[in-house]
Amino acid sequence: MPKTNNRPTIKGIIEIYNNVLQFAETNALQQRERAYGGLMRTLKGGLQELITGEVIKLAWYNLSGSLERLDINSKKIRIPIQKSYVKQIKDEKVKEHILKHIDDYYYGLSVDKHIFIDNKFVMGIECKAYTENAMIKRILIDFHLLKLVHKDIACFLFQLESQLGGDYSALPKTIYGSVSTHSIMSYFEDVDLHIFTLLEGERSITKPIHKFFKPLKYDNVDRAVKLLENYLKEFV
């Protein structure tokens, strides 16, 4: 991925997107055909992570926040075993063993971008080249588990394209979403998931964006920046 200046700009973010897709097809064709699909998925997933990182920094810059106070990482967060679960284990030897080593029982979990302000975890962002509803379930579970130990974090999904149905890919001022996505999210009431799509038009598996170019529009990036500004402003 190309390097960027310390202070991001919307035009610079669009330039990154254009440059990566411009050379994506050429670079991919140099790989073995069998690895082609995986390479493109990795490339576009990494592109979304890079763009999201730049959007976060730009939002913080616009709020006049100090970069020294901002940390963006994807370090694993420990999700400890629930003692209520251990108490229900019927095998007394297993229960006793787990209780004896309880500090060792945890699950290391992360989403793509953890945003810390003054060492406080305030926001998590999952980054996807595209999302379908089967993926939404996993994303919601991850955020549900994170909120068990960091209950106040804001939860976001940033995707290049959408395959969720509804109007997620139309980018209207008011997004009504899709019936399937809302239905799934209704079972995770503790997770207020904000979904933002950067490229207009539903994802088509027969028209990948590295072959059928979709422009990343200035206004769409600007909306993403303003969205994060709205959630980060209380920490400035």
Image (spheres, rainbow, N blue to C red):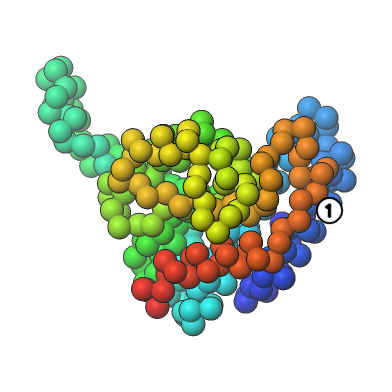
- Judge whether 29 appears above or below 197 on screen: above
Position of 59 compared to 144: left or right?
right
Residue 171 on image: x %, y %: 60, 53
Rendered position, 182 above or below 196: above
Q: Please tell me whether mark 1 sits on a helix, a strand or a loop.
A: helix
Image quadrant where residue 140 sits? top left
**Looking at this rendering, what residue extends furthest in the bottom direction?**
64
Q: Position of residue 119 (x, y in %)?
A: 36, 67
Q: Position of residue 98 (x, y in %)?
A: 20, 30
Circle 1 residue: 22
Q: How many marks?
A: 1
Q: Can residue 127 be seen in this snapshot?
A: yes
Residue drawn at point x = 68 percent, y = 40 percent: 203
Q: State the residue at coordinates (43%, 39%).
A: 182
Q: Split into 4 quadrants, where in the image is the N terminus?
A: bottom right
Image-based side of 232 in relation to 1, left or right: left
Residue at figure coordinates x 51%, y 56% from the top left: 174
Foreground residue among 187 and 93: 187
Q: Outermost residue, top direction?
A: 91
In this rendered view, identify the residue nearer to me: 21 or 73.
21
The quarter of the displayed image where residue 108 is located = top left
Which image quadrant for residue 130? Answer: top right
- Counting from the top left corner in percent of width and height, residue 195 is at 50, 50
Identify residue type, mark 1.
Gln
In the rendered view, would you say 27 is above or below 50?
A: above
